Amino acid sequence: MLTILGKRASINVRKVMWTCDELGLDWRQEDWGAGFRDTHVDEFRALNPNAMVPVLLDGDFVLWESNSIIRYLANRQGDEALYPREARARARVDQWLDWQASDLNRSWSYAFMALVRRSPSHTDADQVEASLQAWTGFMKILDGRLTETGAFVAGTDFSLADIAIGLSVNRWFETPFDHPPLPAVEAYYRRLGERPGFREHGGNGVA
Ligand SMILES: N[C@@H](CCC(=O)N[C@@H](CS)C(=O)NCC(=O)O)C(=O)O
């Protein structure tokens, strides 16, 4: 039985829960992180010195960093549908996973803290605008990619990249601002909604 440490509302924890369900794995989850158990205690920092969720416990194997965890889980199961072994196909999945964790994630950070979390330290209107513009620019790149594939991020098949990006698209639509039309992203969001794993973990994001 796998244990996932982290609150269910967290986008990065939801990546792991969704991947476990796609792979048919048995898992349990404990609520850690802001609003729940404090991750800054020694017990948690011994597992992840960053004091962040998620953390995966697989027996005595401990792993943090959400995209690394979902890669590990697919590798552990030898699942080549979610994470192909062929070098170029795998690189394409990795490219979008890394893009999600770096450029895309960084772009939304200020706007998300201001507009969703209502953080008192994120009230600068110019920075909100700059964040929304950067985020929109990256979402246009995603829209172009999804127009090309007509299906999923890495190509015709659903992959790990769609778990990270699908949750990010949920964040995009759930953040209150005037969204520009992105037809391929909208169609993709509806396509993801056909998957039980997305309905369970993808469409309820608040953190
Ligand atoms: N790069 C890390 C980021 C993890 C992260 O930002 N986790 C957030 C929740 S989404 C967190 O732990 N925040 C502090 C808290 O909730 O206490 C990953 O992808 O796992």
Image (cartoon, rainbow, N blue to C red):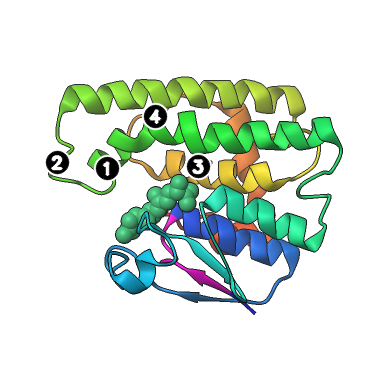
Where is residue 143? Give x, y as percent: 59, 25
Query: Mark 4 to mark 1: distance in Å?
Result: 11 Å
Badge 1: residue crowd in 10 Å (few <14, some 14–19, many ≥20): some
Query: Range of the magenta residues?
Result: 3-10
**Label located before the other in sequence (2 or 3):** 2
Query: Mark 2 to mark 3: distance in Å?
Result: 23 Å
Secondary structure under the numbered disc 2 in the rendered image? loop
The residue pinned by badge 3 equals: 168
Residue at left offset 39%, top offset 29%: 107
Magenta region includes residue 82: no
Q: The residue under label 4 is which amino acid type?
A: Ser
> Residue 20 lies in what quarter of the image?
bottom right
Query: Mark 2 to mark 1: distance in Å?
Result: 9 Å
Q: The residue under label 3 is which amino acid type?
A: Ser
The residue pinned by badge 2 equals: 121
Q: Viewer-proximal residue, 73 or 119?
A: 73
- What's the mark number on residue 107? 4
